[in-house]
């Protein structure tokens, strides 16, 4: 069976947001080889969700849950994108409240957890986000690998521009 892919979180498997692990999915009751390890905001404590139940929206629907807090999405006029990210896309775990960034009228794809090596080549694209964060570029490059800062790298699905959300422990 083909593993679901996610437009807004294309590296979910690589990043171990979805781990290879044998489970019985709480939502669909099926034996699965993959378990979702990211955030799921729901009144119920649901700790075994398979990627199929993320992809088809059944986990979000059944437990009235969100994979990304709907109040922490960059202001954008694109209901379809917001609905897909909140209800049908794996989230990511930040140090503080996760924010989902937008560009070109769409939400961006979450690419990965930032390291100095990962962000250095695209630093010119990230200048504005870093300036707006209130943190200093030099401090970030020095300390991000020690996890004093959390950096969350996104990429625009249309123009390819990288964007960065930052927080601290
Ligand atoms: Zn399932
Ligand atoms: Zn763009």
Image (cartoon, rainbow, N blue to C red):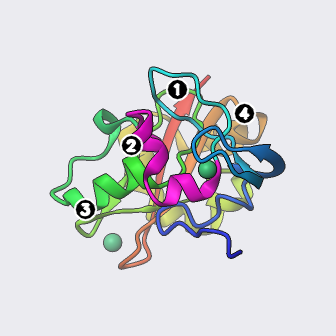
Q: Which residue is mark 3?
A: 80
Write the start and end of the magenta stretch as one range. 50-68
Q: Position of residue 126 (x, y in %)?
A: 46, 58
Q: CA distance from mark 2 to mark 1?
A: 25 Å
Q: Nearer the viewer, mark 4 or mark 2?
A: 2
Can the viewer see residue 113 in this picture? Answer: no
Q: Which residue is at the far front?
A: 29
Q: Residue at x 75, y 54 (%)?
A: 32
31 on left or right of 5: right
Q: Which residue is mark 1?
A: 96
| Label 4 secondary element | loop
Q: Who is closer to the viewer here, 2 or 30?
A: 30
Q: Which residue is mark 2?
A: 61
Q: CA distance from mark 3 to mark 2?
A: 16 Å
155 on left or right of 138: left
Q: Which residue is mark 4?
A: 147
**Residue 156 inside the magenta-drawn segment:** no
For the residues labelled 3 and 2, say whether their Cβ atoms are less than 8 Å apart: no
For the residues labelled 3 and 1, say whether their Cβ atoms are less than 8 Å apart: no
Q: CA distance from mark 4 to mark 1?
A: 13 Å
**Residue 52 inside the magenta-drawn segment:** yes
Give the mark nearest the N terminus, 3 or 2.
2
Q: Position of residue 10 (x, y in %)?
A: 58, 67
For the residues labelled 4 and 2, say whether their Cβ atoms are less than 8 Å apart: no
């Amino acid at each position: 069976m083909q593993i679901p892919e996610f437009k807004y979180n294309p590296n979910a498997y690589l990043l171990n947001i979805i781990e290879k692990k044998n489970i019985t999915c709480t939502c669909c009751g099926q034996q699965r080889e993959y378990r979702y390890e990211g955030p799921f905001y729901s009144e119920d404590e649901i700790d075994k969700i398979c990627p199929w139940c993320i992809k088809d929206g059944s986990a979000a629907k059944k437990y009235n849950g969100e994979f990304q807090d709907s109040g922490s999405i960059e202001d954008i006029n694109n209901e379809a994108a917001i609905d897909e990210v909140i209800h049908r896309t794996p989230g990511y775990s930040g140090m503080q409240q996760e924010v989902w960034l937008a560009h070109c009228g769409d939400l961006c794809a979450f690419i990965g957890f930032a390291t100095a090596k990962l962000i250095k080549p695209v630093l010119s694209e990230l200048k504005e986000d870093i300036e707006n964060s209130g943190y200093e570029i030099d401090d970030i490059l020095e300390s991000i690998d020690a996890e004093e800062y959390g950096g969350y790298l996104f990429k625009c699905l249309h123009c390819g521009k990288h964007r960065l959300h930052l927080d601290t422990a």
